[in-house]
Image: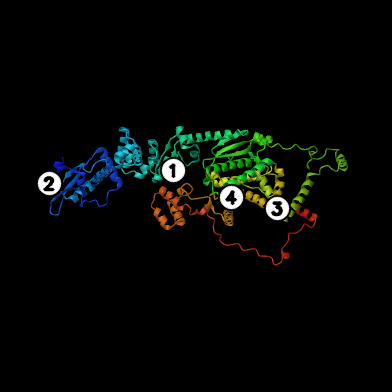
Amino acid sequence: MNAVTEILAAEPVSGVEIFVPLAKLKKSPRNARKVPHGEAAIEALAASIQHKGLIQNLVVEPETKEDGTPTGNYLVTAGEGRRLAMLLRAKRKQIKKSEVVRCWLDTANDPSEISLDENVTRTPMHPADQFERFRELSESKGYGVEEIGARFGVSAGVVKQRLRLGAVSPKLLQVYREDGLTLDQLMAFAITEDHDRQEQVFANLHHNREPWIIRRDMTASNVVAEDRRAIFVGAEAYAEAGGNIIRDLFSEDRGGFFEDAGLLDTLAVEKLREVAERVQAEGWKWAEAHIDYPHAHGMRRFYPQTVALSDEEEARVDEAWAEYDQIVDGYDSLDEMPEDLAAKARALDAEMDALSAKRSAYDPNVIANGGAFVVLQHDGTVRVERGFVRAEDEALADPQPEPEEGDATEPQMGDDEQPEDGDEDVQDADEDEDPGKPISDSLTRDLSAYRTLALRVALAEQPDMALIALTHTLTAQLFYSYAEAGCLEVRPTVTPLGSHADGIEDTPLAARASEQHEAWAERMPRDVADLWGFIVGLDEAKRIALLAHCAARTVNALRLPWDRKPRSLQTADRLADALALDVAKDWTPTVDSYLGRVTKAHIVDAVTEGVSEDAARRIADMKKPDMAQAAEQLLSGTGWLPAVLRTPEPEGADPAPAEPEDADSVEQPPEVEDSEASFAVAAE
């Protein structure tokens, strides 16, 4: 064969097939392609030649010197990519450079035109045909993803994508061939291989066929892998139970989509029930497992009471702290410590936690007659809420002391009851003989009205005591089930937010609010009758902190379309300004929280405000899902907030109150000069 090659080299004849050693093939200076082949293309050609041989000849012409003498080399007029692929194979020691290559010798046609012809005069295969052929190789030949990738020089990921596209409903592939769908839209349908679902979503599409809308509709009944239920159950347990996880091969799916929401709920509840069984084993009468916290349970809740540690336990706490401090001294974290010291520090920490946990405990009656809710938090962890007592068990959980002998009062005769005939003299006689008999209801009302007015005046003159009374009234209603425990007619209203913002009660911010409430609840006396003494016994800072907590529970700054309250919202803005409220500490604009729920124009405005106009321009032409993802990354850490969450700048500072020139000039509240005048006011 080499002899034939040499003869042809000496006496070239156009239009014949020749075999030329790879080392004697060179790039033609008249090749029409000036932009070089990409590495991926050369890889694909090399893989194809490796498995199937050279399907198409190279077109060559003899290389000559300036005087026309042949050099013995050949210039590749058409097939430069194949020549480079062969060289790559030689570099990998798959072949030698002496390997002969099948070529077509052409000296009759213009080499530049041949090169141009090869790259222009051809019709590429439609992508749909390519996808289906890949699918056929997998199904009819039994080739795996790696095998197909090796034969065509593409990655396993690319093969998976093409196989998935080839598995789209034939009806939709035909629509794609006819230009009724774009490749991006087809990729959105390929998120699942369910042909019926694909065709159903396609039939329901209207004028807006954005890929993100198709993906949304395709996965409407599925659960994202970031869902708390999916995190709690885990992909492995879900798959073992027969569940299927859908993977989006064409975009970031963050773990995929759990296809069977019902199965996922069942597995989550079963796992929560296992936790509930362990909680009930603590001695509780019942423990219920719920994915969502049952806010409408209507039960009274009891909290643990403070328990004093024994002298030995208190001494051990101090001793353990001293040991712990001595071990960790000089280290910034346990990770920096030697393993033996770190293990000892962890053991001491666990011991101190166990001792601290003994400082509070539930009343045995509450445990024996109460229960707990085991619920799933926003991050897929479990939260246990203990101390709830059903209405029928309240008497057993919180037995009221029996009235002491002599406490019972005799039934009183109402104002509208008249003594029977002949009893009037007896009544008069009884009144003369028994001065301790209860007075009439009408007189009781009159006197209590007088006392109420006196209390109002006195309380207004003693702000410190008003603070105690207000704190007591609010606390009694927010922590106990006794609305009548306070004597101030102030009623706190706590509006649940869960019905207005889905999942808000499972956020870290809601967890902080719950922890604050529980921290106070654990300090409250069990009996509301002892609440006044508890509040009086607090120092001023703690008393104000309790009032602040109670007041904070009643804040309502909701903006509802059916509830127009501009003055309330204006006050909420002033409160936010006074508090220097910065929602950005706890809220960030993500695809789920904001960017995926507004228009592209809103996204561009957000990036313009939060980053820059240049950044906004860079994403302006993106499709909405990509734009939202890009905007989430750009806005991360910027502190940008939508207008609803911002604390507005005050329009103008309130004028400072004028200081009185003389303290004596300040008008003092009128004193109650005599009881008759005050009684007259009360009567009016």
Question: Helix, strand or loop at disc 4?
Answer: loop
Identify the secondary structure beneath mark 2: helix
Residue denoted by label 3: 466
Q: Nearer the viewer, mark 3 or mark 4?
A: 3
Neighbourhood count class around disc 1 (C-alpha, 10 Å): few under 14, some 14–19, many 20 upward:
few
Q: Amino acid at mark 4?
A: Asn
Q: Which residue is mark 4?
A: 556
Comparing 174 with 164, the one in front is 164
Which residue type does callout 2 highlight?
Ala
Earlier sequence position, callout 2 versus callout 4: 2
Determine which residue is flagged by label 1: 254
- Mark closest to the chain's N terminus, 3 or 1: 1
Residue 304 in sight from this viewpoint: no
Q: How far apart are the alpha carbons under marks 1 and 2? A: 64 Å
Mark identifier at residue 10: 2
Q: Dot 3: what SS?
A: helix
Q: Label 3 vs label 2: CA separation?
A: 116 Å
Q: Residues within 10 Å of mark 4 (few under 14, many from 20)?
A: some
Marks 2 & 4, CB-CB < 8 Å contact? no
Name the quadrant containing residue 480: top right
Q: Secondary structure at mark 1?
A: loop
3D distance between C-alphas at marks 2 and 4: 96 Å
Q: Nearer the viewer, mark 4 or mark 1?
A: 1
Report x, y in % for residue 86: 24, 43
Nearest to the eye among marks 1 and 2: give it. Answer: 2
